Amino acid sequence: MRIMGRPRALVSVVLGCLLLAGCGSGPSQTRAAILIGDHEITVDQVQQVIDRAVTQEPAAQQLAQQHKLDLLGRAIVGQLVVHEMITRAAQREGLRADPALVAQAVNALSQPSPTSGIDPAVLAGDIALRARDHTEAATDYVLERALGEKYFDKLSVDFDYTTVSTDDNGPRREQAEAKAKQFAASPNAATTLVRADAGAGMDAELGTTLPALQSPMFAGSVLFGVPAGTVVSFEADPSQSVWLVAVIRKRDLNASPAVDQAQQATAGQLASVGIRLLQQDVERSGVKINPRYGVWDPVAMDVAPSAAEVSGFVLPVEGYVQP
């Protein structure tokens, strides 16, 4: 694969790469912010965290002055969704949070958020972490890291892909969405399209195998989070505005990849992989978000303002039969 992609970071905080996205009626009603099965997180609970942030964090006060507290609400909801998922996954996987690592993360979260030089959406995620219970947020991070570490050297995906890197046929996002729908039209549709793109000199390839060990940053992307028979489309290289459109042919959590140039993952990258491994848990749990906060974005593993503003596309391949 010739492009150098990197997943969208959900939040950037201390500890170098501390990446987290950890967050009686349904969310369509005013009381519930999040509904996960029969478990409800209320609007009042989310508002309490917002109020605490505005009271304690100068950076949150700055967002309030800029009328951007909606960013903070979405960040809190996204983190609480992943908090529920990582808590359940840890029980299933038998994971325990290392007390020493939790203590280190708690200490980091006790420092105030920066107030300048950071994208407001990223800043909102950082504020949300610090406004939540520090032990809970720190434990989420440590468990996400542990989950990522458990599977990192065994995680691999096989896929066919093409790229969208020019604006000749309209905005790249729209081109990527259209191509994703073409890929998803039938089990063999992508093969024909990829061959045509490769023949036209585009960055496109059939039968790519990518172990997580070969690309720790890319391993936290949606490419590694969906089952076989799924099409994904996302901005794989934001610095070059390159969109990747891929169909997953195989996803292996127990591979033994022979990797000549294995890369060492950072703690933050392992946590990002851990978050990505929760993607199918979110889907199976039927998470519902109150529209006042937005919609769940499976590509970002976070909450987007609306369906039109999700960071990519995930589509099942029509007619695909699991082997």
Image (cartoon, rainbow, N blue to C red):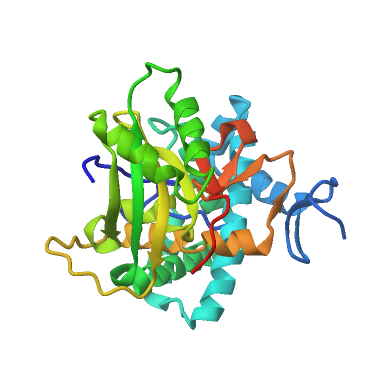
Question: x%, y% of residue 154?
Answer: 31, 72
Q: Nearer the viewer, residue 198 or 80?
A: 198
Left or right of residue 284: residue 302: left
Taking 110 as reference, is 258 above or below it?
Answer: below
Frontmost residue, 286 versus 35:
286
Q: 76 and 234: which one is in front?
A: 234
**Rendering coords of residue 178 (x, y %):** 50, 31
From the viewer's perspective, is 174 left or right of 30? left
Residue sitting nearer the eye, 64 or 191? 191
Total numbered badges shown on the rendered structure: 0
Return the x and y of residue 64 as percentages of the image width and height.
Answer: 62, 31
- 181 displayed left or right of 293: left
Can residue 237 be seen from the camera position used here? no
Q: Is residue 233 above or below residue 120?
A: below
Q: Is residue 184 visible?
A: yes
**Residue visible at 43% across and 68% down in the picture:** 142
Relative to residue 69, is residue 191 depicted above or below?
Answer: below
Write the residue at 23% across / 29% down: 201
Q: Which residue is found at the position 33% from the left and 27% from the top?
A: 165
